[in-house]
Image (tube, helix red, strand yellow):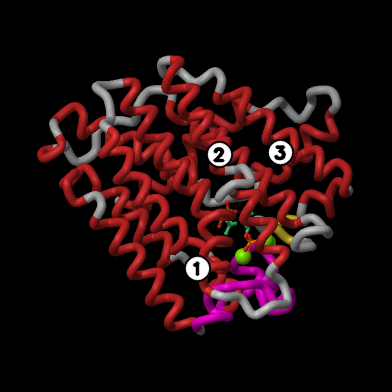
Amino acid sequence: MLKQVLEQGREAADAALERLLPPATQHPTSIHQAMRHSVFAGGKRLRPILCMEAGRMIRAASVAGIQAGPPAGSLPAGIEKVGAALEMLHTYSLIHDDLPALDNDDLRRGRPTCHKAFGEATAILAGDALQTQAYEVLAQIDCPAEARVEIIREIAHATGTIDGMIGGQVVDLEAEHKKPDLATLEYIHRSKTAALITASVVSGGMYAGAMYTGATSADIGRLRIYGQSIGLAFQIVDDVLDLTQTSEQLGKTAGKDTAAEKATYPALFGIEESIRKADALVDQACAQLDEYGTAASTLKDLAHYLVERKK
Ligand code: IPE
Ligand code: IPE
Ligand code: MG
Ligand code: MG
Ligand code: MG
């Protein structure tokens, strides 16, 4: 069941990205080739999938009443465009994360990183271009204008400097070669990774709420806590996988965090305790969704998948 959700979600996200990104033949071709090189390199598409499944759950709840949501209704129409925009922003963050000035990585999603394949200048611009393209797409999503603006604000804030992705990346770099304290480590992980994951879930809920009978602020609050918990668990697991998997398995260079003396959960707590913490966060996340009954089963399965994954 989850395998099907992951596969169909990936296909829906890929098809939307294919439609919404400029073709590789579009002038100036070098930048469009670079954007596509990084986007279509076999990412898991977790952020679009979380967005779409949060939308599906809120739609089911709003159709049938919270207590008795049907198992899995259809996706809110057009929600894959929100997912595609989230994936553009995520891929932009990866291209810049890999640059020599940041993590200096040669391998990403099983391919040479964008700057290795196209040079640093083009890679910087490809990241910038994916960011602007994401907002052009978001400006044209199908939900009512008020919700569209709210979704744009939510996602922009989550990728910004205040408790958002860029803020987290700044502190991640500043914390290299230092023994991290827990507060700094949590700030880094919640900001650089959990913020965009949270925005993915919340924007999916907002979209479905605006398209159908309305998500309450309690619905959005529950999705936000679910997103924050799985987002932190996701980065803890990313840190563990960096230590326990091969580069071939990950499609990115393993063992990089130790080499760069990054602030990670395993560095502070060891691998086993880190995994326990990730599991506890997933339990917390799932508890938030109990009131949605069977309509929440896919989001709960996804939460478990995020910590059980091997890449
Ligand atoms: C990697 O994200 C970067 C982090 C935030 C840890 P993913 O593990 O979702 O990478 P892709 O999209 O599948 O390549
Ligand atoms: C990356 O964290 C987070 C963002 C890209 C915002 P990492 O530096 O741990 O991600 P990987 O391991 O390179 O994918
Ligand atoms: Mg990094
Ligand atoms: Mg990195
Ligand atoms: Mg990592």
Residue 262, visible in the rendered structure: yes
Q: Measured from the top left, where is residue 296 in percent x and y?
A: 24, 46
Give the labeled residue for mark 2: 157
Q: Which mark is residue 309?
A: none
User: Is residue 215 shown left or right of residue 33?
Assistant: left
Give the labeled residue for mark 1: 236
- The residues tagged by marks 3 and 2 sit, at their Cα atoms, a distance apart of 25 Å
Q: Mark 1: which secondary structure?
A: helix
Among the two numbered marks 2 and 1 on one chain, the one whose residue lies closer to the N terminus: 2
User: Is residue 284 shown left or right of residue 13?
Assistant: left
Q: Name the residue: 62% across, 43% down.
A: 160
Q: Amino acid at mark 2?
A: His
Q: Name the residue: 71% across, 38% down.
A: 36
Give the labeled residue for mark 3: 36
- The residues tagged by marks 2 and 1 sit, at their Cα atoms, a distance apart of 22 Å
Nearest the viewer among 11 and 168 is 168
Q: Which residues are magenta?
A: 244-269
